[in-house]
Image (spheres, rainbow, N blue to C red):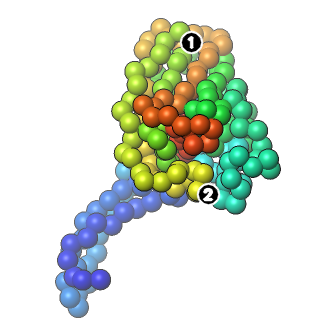
Amino acid sequence: MKPGTYTATLFEGELESGTASVSVSAGGTASLTLKAAASRPSTIWSIGTADGTPAGFLNADKIERIHPSDSRMSSWGPVTFTIGNSASSFPMAQFKDVNNPTTLKWSASSSQIGARTLRIRTTEAFAGGRPQITVNSWTSSAPSAPTAVDSRGVTRGTWRGLNQIYDFAIPSGTLVAGTNTIQINVISGSSGSQFLSPNFVYDSVELF
């Protein structure tokens, strides 16, 4: 390593949490202070852990040794997931041509409704795949495409890529006391079939 100025990165799990610069001179020593700065709001509910991995989700334990299309994989869905159920029934990845959409069912109390934010964290994407949501009768705007990576995505046996955060502001009056339905759809300007269709890998889903 040549002496110079470097950026050090702090990770929580595999989630980038903070950075700081440090200058190092030949034969010298240097110190720096790294602090976790990742946004972690108090949530009403969450699916998974915001740690930069899909650990605990459906098929996450197999993806590094089995192709997504392999019969040994559990069925990808499409999945209808009830908030409060085990994260192991929530898909680690969502493919436009395979298990789209993922539907969330949530029974809200009157104190939990109002203007809220749904945050979807992803660890990688393929062919411009990113989420768009519909909450009851309201549909969010379409987020911009993630940075393209020259890779076949999750089909190469890994979920590692460029972590992304998608925050969807749910307007007041959208959520209701009682049963709410949230659909997460893969959108993309690109096409593909089956497991090479636009897709993304989940890190976590949080409502706050």
Q: Is residue 53 visible?
A: no
How far from the left and from the top, in percent, is residue 106?
65, 21
Q: Is residue 163 above or below residue 42?
A: below
Say which residue appears at 57% left-offset and 32% top-offset: 96
Please name whichever residue, 69 or 49, is drawn nearer the observer in this view of the structure. 69
Q: In which quadrant of the rendered view does residue 194 lie?
A: top right
101 vs 170, nearest the viewer: 101
Residue 54 in the image, given as x and y percentages of width and height: 60, 48
Name the secondary structure under disc 2.
loop
Mark 2 Cα-neighbour bin, 10 Å: few <14, some 14–19, many ≥20: some
Could you say which is closer to the camera, residue 165 or residue 73? 73
**Element marked by disc 1:** loop
Q: Amino acid at mark 2?
A: Gly
Q: Which is in the foreground here, disc 1 or disc 2?
A: 2
As measured in the structure, the alpha-carbon distance from the residue carrying label 1 to the one carrying label 2 is 35 Å
Give the number of the disc on residue 136: 1
120 sits left or right of 22 in the view: right
Q: Amino acid at mark 1?
A: Asn
Q: Residue at x 49, y 44 (%)?
A: 126
- Name the residue: 72% across, 32% down: 77
Please give the label number shown on residue 92: none
Q: Vertical placement of 9 versus 86: above or below?
A: below
x, y percent for residue 89: 73, 38
Q: Using the image, determine if residue 66 lies above or below residue 84.
A: below
Tell me, for residue 157, which label it has, or none: 2
Residue 18 sits in quarter: bottom left
* Residue 25 percent across, percent down from the top left: 19, 83
Residue nearer the viewer, 74 or 80: 74
Q: Is residue 16 left or right of residue 25?
A: right
Instruction: Name the residue: 22% across, 82% down.
Output: 3
